[in-house]
Amino acid sequence: MYRSEIGRSITILEHLIKLHFLKQNRNATIFCDNLDITFKKSDVVDIVLFGHGLKNIFSYKLFPRTSRFTFWVLNSNFKKRFVHYLGLPSDSIGVLDRYELFPPIVEREYDLPKLSNFIYSGRPLTLKNFELTIMLLNHYKKMTNEAVKLEVCSPMFKKSDFIRYIPESNDIEIEFLGDLGIDWYKKVENPHDKTLINLSLDPFDDFNVSVAQWQQIGGGTIVSTFGPYAHLRGKNIIRISSNKLLESIDCDYSENSLDTIVEIMCKSSQENSLLASSDDLSLKSLSWDEVASFVENVPRNIRDGLFRQNSYTLCNLTREMINGES
């Protein structure tokens, strides 16, 4: 089990993924940071890679050498990365459908509310783009004359961790709700009058439990088109191009770059009717030696981005992955 409070999302996902496989009379090995890894005795082992999955597969030496392996990820873009960077055969990787793990708990989606009340549920890390969120909402207020309020909730992070990203010129109302717990979305007042905003370009984002929980209650969202967010389904979603977000960051949130994003926000929501990912139970299994061969051939620049993590290498890794998703 994940040991720290910051790993709540990991804990929730671990539990739901195990249940998903147990319903099919299968045992999956969850391979993620800080989880206690155990392998069931089996000729073929289902390995679910999430969190820092692209990084964690480098620990393949922990895999039992006498078994064969099939791999599972949590979104199609991550599958593309395993195929592209490791050369893993596409038919050895399955994709779990996020809407089977987090099915709706309301009868319908709510219409996207008037864009004035927003909520941010996440960490104040660089590529989570909290600073960009603040700059964007300030510009949105300037362009639309709307009264804008942002509520912020996050486990284990202090108000001061967020405040350092807020400029002195800030002109929107910001309320810090603190840590609302695992069921944070149930404690938000009037949730259907609020829009969850998540502009993350974190290269390790492969699911985002907060977004999944918000969608469970039919809430509207504004998200990037990066990683897992590209495959969200629903009628009350506004998607901001990852390239447009990167352009704005690169030019220090210039007015022109923010104008473009605000224009996208002001358009109607964009329905994504992508079909659900199917769990193909007849995946091709790989031997330990085959897995080792693929992993050891990962390009050096990708390894650096995964293991020498700083803002420079992570940003470069994000750019590389955005280009791969285009």
Image (cartoon, rainbow, N blue to C red):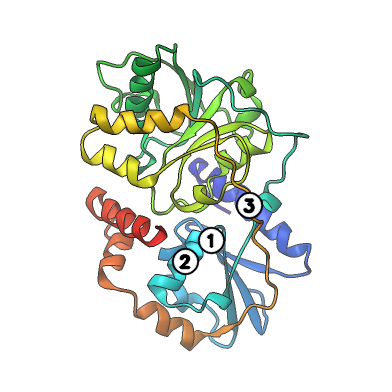
Taking the image as shown, residue 202 lies to the left or right of residue 100, namely left
Quarter of the image for the C terminus: give it.
bottom left
Q: Secondary structure at mark 3?
A: helix
Cα distance between the residues tagged 3 and 1: 11 Å
Residue at coordinates 46% horizontally, 34% vertically from top-left?
156
| Numbered circle sitting on residue 76 | 1
Label 3 belongs to which residue? 98
> Looking at the picture, how far across and down is residue 190, in whole percent?
64, 18
Q: Earlier in the sequence, mark 3 or mark 2?
A: 2
For the residue marked with disc 2, what is the amino acid? Answer: Lys
Crowding at dot 3, Cα within 10 Å, few <14 / some 14-19 / many 20+, comes out as many
Q: Earlier in the sequence, mark 3 or mark 1?
A: 1
Instruction: Report if the CB atoms under discs 2 and 1 are less than 8 Å apart.
Output: yes
> Looking at the picture, how far across and down is residue 311, in whole percent?
25, 48
> Looking at the picture, how far across and down is residue 218, in whole percent?
67, 33
Label 2 belongs to which residue? 80
Nearer to the camera, 309 or 103:
103
Q: Secondary structure at mark 1?
A: helix
